[in-house]
Image (cartoon, grey):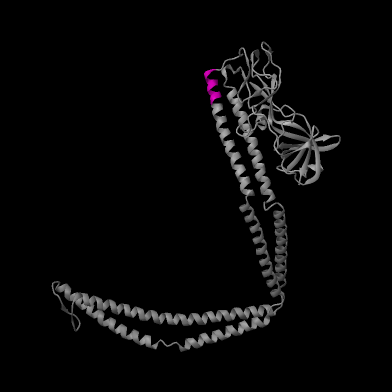
Amino acid sequence: MHRNPRSRAIVPLAVLGLWLASCSAVPSLGAAPTSTPASPAPAPTGLIAEGRLFPRHVVDLSFDTGGTIAEVNTQVGDTLQANQVVAQLASSASHDTDEIRAQKAAAVALAQQNLIAAQEEVTNSQKALADLLAPAAVAVNQAQAQAHIADLQKQIDDANRNLGYLVSPDIRRLQENVAQAQNALTDARQNAALVDVSQLQAELLDAQKQLQTATNVYNNAKDAFARCPSCATVWAYDRTTNWADAQSLYTDAVNLVQQLQTQIDQSARGTSLGITTAQDNLRDATNQLNYYLKGPDAVKVNQAQADLALLKSQLAKAQTDAATLQQNGGVDADQLKAARDRVANAQAGLDAAQASLASAQASVSPDGVALRAPFAGTVAAQGLEVGELVSAGQTVVTLADLSQWEVQTDDLTEVEVVQVAVGQAVKITFDALPNVTLAGVVRTISPQYQKVNGDITYVVYVNLTDHDPRLRWGMTAKVEFAR
């Protein structure tokens, strides 16, 4: 089976998927269409374009091989389900080998995997768009914008103070800083002179004597017990003692000496550190005073002025961005466009995956002689008769999904098209239905221009989100673009 998908013009089979909608999203054509209330009319911009109504999905069907028509199962106006047999040839010019059948089965399996992935991407992209538009996300965006403005304002205040200090420093305060630092150094020196470690040194001398005695006891006891391991006590340096007492005496003496030495060392270091710190503070305060007494530093003043100007520029941009964000309902315009583009691309990918699966499944039919509907739709044109000889690739049936409509307008000039964006809401009226207004949304804008009567124009595709059972292929429409 061969199909030539088209939308007012035949396009290659590779882009058939661009015309197919999700099987789960397309309503059954067996049910009678009903009119739905039009969406509330958006505020007009004054931009109005003429267009024409088309089914969103149209395909021309043909056999992959030539032969004689053995069976015709449809006629114009019939409603078909996806994969339903439209017609069948009496014979096929070739028969698939086992290898080819295996290849076709693998192609079907791969197409099914691609369809699942495409459906997941549609779901994920729609969720990402919904998350972006969620009230909580909008509130976070606005709060972050205001926090950024507040932070920049604080930086500007600090920069102003710094610049003012560079131009006109507070010499009096700097002199007070020097005086305070001098007083602190004097106090540190006086405190050092008052520190008395003589008592600690006396205690250390006594402790060292005790340590000497304890050492003698310990060494004598060690030697004595070595000579008489079974003795309970021994004579050690003018006393009788046991081994445990000798050890304890020695350990206590060592600890006491170390403790007193540490206290003396800490006292000396603390006194020295206090004086050194006070000297450093006095030197810094004096240097700072002398620096500012020389007058403003032109290099630092210029740098401070440049930093302040940059901060003010950043603040102006942040305020403009916040205002734009507020106008866009709390959503960043670039992020919103990217999210909508992702949804559109995901839907196009799903359409392509569905078309690819339908094509792969159709190719598996016995001998490839069955012509099947790639999607649910209505037979718009059919030129088949039993016994007729057809060629490979010859269009024999046109199938259209009349449950989903789109309007194409090709008269937007280069000046007008820049006022239109994907996802923009529109109002649509028809010459044939003057009292009916339907809602729609811009699906895509053709990137390629065309020249009409000397004007550069672009094709804009608009999906109808409302429906009316009286809509007919080819009706003239007027599209009014909302703000």
Q: Is residue 458 above or below residue 77?
A: below
77 in relation to 440, above or below? above
Q: Is residue 238 magenta?
A: no
Q: Residue visible at 54% across and 26% down? A: 106
Spot occupied by residue 311 in the image (x, y as percentages of width and height): 70, 63
Within the magenta stretch, is there residue 100?
yes
Q: Is residue 153 visible?
A: yes
The N terminus: image quadrant: top right
Please give the count of numbered marks on the rendered protein. Answer: 0
**What x and y, as percent, mark residue 409?**
78, 36
Read off the magenta span. 97-105
Relative to 370, say whether 318 is above or below.
below
Q: Quadrant of residue 228?
A: bottom left
Q: Decide if residue 449 is in sight here.
A: no
- The image quadrant that residue 3 belongs to is top right
Q: Position of residue 6 (x, y in %)?
A: 71, 28
- Pick the front one: 450 or 354: 354
* Residue 148 figure quarter: bottom right
Residue 91, percent from left and from top: 61, 12
**Magenta segment main secondary structure:** helix
State whether residue 29 is above or below residue 226.
above
